[in-house]
Image (cartoon, rainbow, N blue to C red):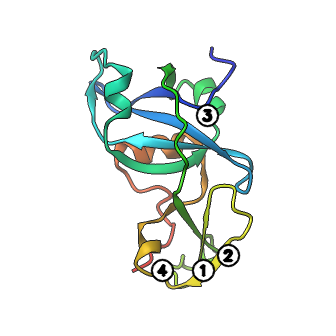
Amino acid sequence: MTRTIKKGDIFSVQISENTKRYFQYIENDLTQLNSDVVRIFKKVYSISDKSELSEIVNDEVDFYAHCVIKFGIKMKLWEKVGNVTFNEKVDVIFRGTNDYGTKVGEEPIKISNNWYVWRTNDADFTKVGKLSDENKKSYIGLVFNPAGLVELIKGNRYPINYPDFE
């Protein structure tokens, strides 16, 4: 089992019996529970494909997410396949809302107009209310449990009761 996780590490995630996708660890976000920030690549590969790491990291990024990589390794949901140096500045906007979660007996809020946004390691979470143009491109800022991240990588909605912005 991989004990040390380093910036630039690439991981393979099996998403079906015959396919897999990849993600790369790019940063640690101290402002979001000191979690790992990963970028998930769009391309779907055959499970038997032995892809070049340089090809993987040159693929288009599908989305960014917070997670704890070591938990996913321990749960055998992904495995480290290599490392490609990552020295780029991370300039990704994440979003969150206090409208997530409900009290017993209440219906979940489907559309939130109570958003805040931040960039990694930016202690100033900015309340924006309704998301504007640039902020509509933001990514959900939850720290995903490993199984939830796999659902996102498979293309499924997760969490199912997280509010939309429109």
Give the image location of residue 76, x and y in percent. Answer: 54, 24
The first of marks 4 and 2 along the sequence is 2
The one nearer the camera, 71 or 39, is: 39
The first of marks 2 and 3 along the sequence is 3
Whether the residues at callouts 2 and 1 have beta carbons within 8 Å, the answer is yes
Identify the residue at image location x=55%, y=62%.
94
Q: Secondary structure at mark 1?
A: loop
Query: Which quadrant, please, contains the C terminus?
Result: bottom left
**Which tag is nearer the camera, tag 4 or tag 1?**
4
Whether the residues at callouts 1 and 3 have beta carbons within 8 Å, the answer is no
For disc 3, the marked residue is 69
The circle drawn on residue 103 is 2
**Which tag is nearer the camera, tag 4 or tag 2?**
4
The circle drawn on residue 153 is none
**Up/down of 44 relative to 154, above or below:** above
For disc 1, the marked residue is 106
Whether the residues at callouts 4 and 2 have beta carbons within 8 Å, the answer is no
**Which tag is nearer the camera, tag 2 or tag 3?**
3
Q: For label 2, count other residues whose C-alpha is less than 10 Å away and answer few (under 14), some (14-19) or many (20+).
A: few
Q: Secondary structure at mark 4?
A: loop
**Which tag is nearer the camera, tag 1 or tag 3?**
3
| Amino acid type of the residue that numbered disc 4 sits on in the rendered structure | Leu
The one nearer the camera, 140 or 137, is: 137
For disc 4, the marked residue is 131
**Up/down of 35 relative to 124, above or below:** above
| Amino acid type of the residue that numbered disc 2 sits on in the rendered structure | Lys
